[in-house]
Amino acid sequence: MSGKLSSFDENHPRGSVPVTPDQIESAVAASMPQTVEDLKRLAAIPSVAFPGHPEEPVLAAAAVTEDLLRSAGLPRVQQVAVEGSYPAVYAEAPAPPGAPTVLLYAHYDVQPAGDPAAWRTPPFEPTLIDGRLYGRGTADDKSGVMSHVAALRAFRGRFPVGIKVIVEGQEEYAGERLEAFVERNPELLRADAIVVADTGNPRVGDPAVTTSLRGMAAFTVEVRTLREPVHSGSAGGAAPDALAALMRMLTALHDDNGDIRVPGLPRGSFFGQGPSEEEFRKTAGVLDGVSLVGSGSLADRLWSSYAITVTGLDVPTVAQAINAVQPVARARVTVRVPPAGDPKTTVNAVVDFLRQVAPWGVQVGFGDFTVGSGFQADSGGAARAALNRAMERAFGRPPRDVGAGGSIPLVNTLLKQFPAAEILLFGAEDEDAGCHAPNERVDLEELRKVATAEALFLLELGSPGAA
């Protein structure tokens, strides 16, 4: 392949589209006002697919996603049933003779908004402030939906490669259900390259391709000590407090430096550049005077090592506290697993450790297990080379490899089902986008560049000699 982006002419024997990189860039830029309006329309829908939330908005988001993909010129667009979950939206366009096929992934469901008082703007009223669109899902992952739509619209229905699109409806809560769908329908999703638009750059304007993902394991631990609460004055000091026991168990997971004490979970190494401490402290919102935890480089800690986090506690709130020794306490524990680690082995190691450190002979139970594998990309082939050139043109500099501490279990399933396919992770969710947090937002210039890079990638991959 040549070192610069290719262009096509109308007489190309593979029937490719008659566009140049300049025309692609102009088409994406010209369509941005419509892209922004469509993102507002989609992000205004509270498509929270968690139990206890209404189904109607999730189904409405599926319908809007279907309309958007149809507007992108794809000849086949439909909702497909996913067992035990909300429908996915599937679309496809056949490949020109001899051209490869690219699968594009995103999801239309979102995290719950949380406390509305923590938001600068109403979470489901997308609001434009200083070039950034605020609202739940504007970044994660409705920006992914729109980057696909904007890239595809640039071709006006004449695509240089085969296109398949799958937009999931319950990734944030139960993404493993789409994994089963992929395993049962491999031919529907088979492709030569796969673009997962559910990550982003370390900073706005700093192009990157995510080459590793940590896996995840999660479980609930419950401690019981008494039949019922007892008066803390008459029984405190002798009656075993379930909350105190659970706290001792959870704090035992880490040493004073914040490194994990569980045997068999060593620190890993990431061979690439991670964020500086200053960048990370700003992005994570670490308060002045508060130290970071753990050892090794930030890239090691964030992308290639285990991490254990207590994400929830079931105990009386301060407002509802009574003077009683607690008979039962529960916690939700999440473990991030390096790409090469095994989530099931990892969760077993953590559970065994908690049993060992449980004090006073308390009764300990575990349940609600969830596991998902990580991902490590290969060094790259034709698709990665095409993406490098596309991102360099769109951003003005070539991308670098980064890791992601979060998990996308579907990626590992795609890798197992299609081992010959190149899987490429990039998108508009920069590290400061507030995904899963209040005041989530997407930078619209970043969205334009990502959509442009994706369209240029499709153009380049469909050029002669690229496949």
Image (cartoon, rainbow, N blue to C red):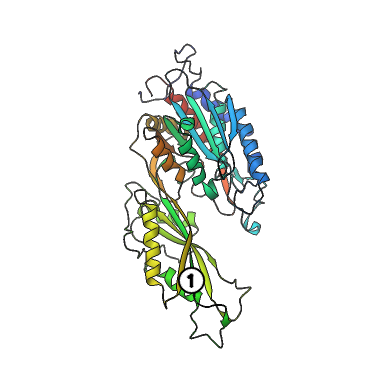
Specify whether 182 is left or right of 321: left
- The one nearer the camera, 203 or 439, is 439
Q: Quadrant of residue 357?
A: bottom left
Could you tell me if residue 429 is visible in this image? no
Q: Residue at x 38, y 59 (%)?
A: 348
* 346 up-or-down from 153: above or below: below
Q: Quadrant of residue 345?
A: bottom left
| x and y, in percent, of residue 125 in the image | 67, 47
- The one nearer the camera, 252 or 325, is 325
Question: Mark 1: which amino acid?
Answer: Val
Instruction: Provide the residue designation for mark 1.
Output: 223
Q: What kind of element bears circle 1?
A: strand
* 395 up-or-down from 370: above or below: above
Furthest residue to the bottom? 234
Q: Quadrant of the C terminus?
A: top left
Could you tell me if residue 211 is visible in this image? yes
| x and y, in percent, of residue 136 in the image | 60, 48
| x and y, in percent, of residue 1 in the image | 35, 23
What is the count of numbered marks? 1
Specify whether 137 is left or right of 201: right
